[in-house]
Amino acid sequence: FATRFRPRLPGRHRLRLIAAWVGGSPLTVQLGDLVVVGEPWEGIPRPDAQDPRFFSAGGRFIWPLGHNLNSTYDVRSRSSLGTTLTPDRGSFTRDALLERLIAAGGTGCETWLSAWNLGLEWSQDWPGYRGAGRYHPGHAWALDRFLDRAEAAGMHVNLSIFNHGMARENAGAEAEWPFHPWRRANGGWMERPSELFRDERAFVAQRKLFRYLGARYGDSPALLGWKLWAEVNLAEADNDEVVAWHARAGRAMAEADGSGRGVTTHWCGDWNSADRRIAAQPEMGYLTIDAYHGEGTLIADLLAASTRDPLQAGQGLAGFAKPILVTEFGGSPGACAPARLAAEHAIGPWVGLVSGHGGAPMLWWFEWIDQQDRFALYGAVRRFLDGEDLRSREAACIAPTAVASGQTLWCRAWSRPGRMLGYVLDRAWGFAGGDGQRLAVGELVVGESVAPGELSLEWWDCDRGEIVERRQVSHAGGRLALPMPAFQRHLAFKLVRATAP
């Protein structure tokens, strides 16, 4: 056995080990005292107390930036995008994928406790698994290793516990119930996957898993939060029972962790699929969704609408005052044309940044990113974000007007007192991808609400993450129109007040 203890306060800590067995007497051993020096530590990420749309740890702003890393390979990517299945070498593969994301500047990802990745409990017919009630020691160790490396790199991992296939027995959507260790035909006690949400013995087993997860991994500052289900709206179960289960399971997971870290669940499709009754539960500390779409939808519009877009009134999930994370996007569930996918991959984090997402939207197609070497985006966004903090109760997404080469461009900005971060997009490129048209010098109209004073304006190349133009602006008041340099595809800007109005 190994014990990991992460003290949060300096001083003398008295430790005691208690071991208990069914039918036996407990054993208590007094361990040696541990003397801790240094400053108090608080590194557990939580929804921020002052601006609950974002995450923070010990007052430090957190905005995870990266892609979904649900497994070590993806058969859907092979069929949709022609990628090659990555050889499943377990931690060797998983660690290599994580290292490349870290090297590129990534600060966040998601991984799954699915049967084909890091699952702990599954049918003993599958290699390494031990059946109901017994956990996979190799996968438990691999998750230790994964989180330790993420911690060392300053990354945050969204951990998905159950996936929709576990609750499906019919054709389509990766039905995995036939292999579930709790299924009666496999030696378990349940007949249907719907019982996962109402059976008392199932809940006792789920709570046991939560306790194990909280005890073993709950002290990790790399763990962003607990995602109870991936795409729970695909589960074959009564919706009222699913709603009630989430309130109960959310409490149980939070109690097992004990750190105040957020618990969430996830819906497939887009933000419209989120069950409002579950989203409103206090047990749900943040919300995770997909952003898949048809050919006629611009990804920038969908991502902005997922929170609160000033040009799409009444839409989005921002009203729940919780961090919103898109953990899957990239065309439809079957992807899209590679040129368009490249554009959407490049667009996603920038739109998330200017529309109040709790972290960068995560592209699902990780093998495509890896095999196409599409990592540069993360370094570019990270350089732009260096030193920035999106939190403020007064912060909001606004919609300036940007025009170039006779075209009205897509433009949003995240505005808070004294600082505005903005993003300008060639809509045609967002739909088609490719090289995009070179757009002539244009104009950005912020509006008439900016107070007079000295302003600093920076224009950034979104692909390289570099400043392309910097100027000082003496604003006399009234309509604020700013010259916009020629660009291709997309452009970002920072408008900062240099002196008090």
Image (cartoon, helix red, strand yellow):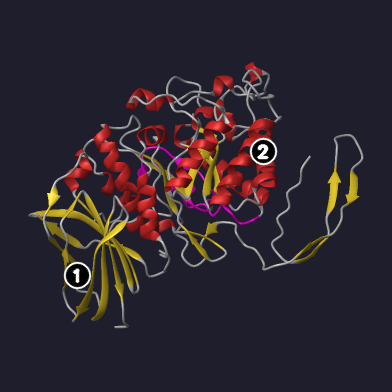
* Label 2 crowd bin: few (<14), some (14–19), many (20+), radius 10 Å: many
Q: Is residue 345 left or right of residue 277?
A: left
Q: Is residue 356 visible?
A: no
Task: State the extent of the magenta-drawn residues as a range.
Answer: 259-286
Circle 1 SS class: strand
Residue at position x 38%, y 28% in the image: 77
Residue 356: x %, y % from top left: 37, 58
Which quarter of the image is occupied by the C terminus? Answer: bottom left
Q: Quadrant of residue 432?
A: top left
Identify which residue, 164 or 103, lies in the foreground. Answer: 103
Q: Residue at position x 57%, y 24% from top?
A: 192
Q: Which mark is residue 30?
A: none
- Disc number placed over residue 209 in the picture, else none: 2
Q: Quadrant of the N terminus?
A: top right
User: Within the image, what quadrant is residue 450 found in?
Assistant: bottom left
Judge from the rendering whether residue 15 lies leftward or rightward of residue 250; answer left or right.
right
Asked if residue 53 can be seen in this view, the reply is yes
Question: In terms of depth relative to the viewer, which is nearer, 318 or 190?
Answer: 318
Q: Is residue 193 magenta?
A: no
Q: Position of residue 361 (x, y in %)?
A: 39, 47
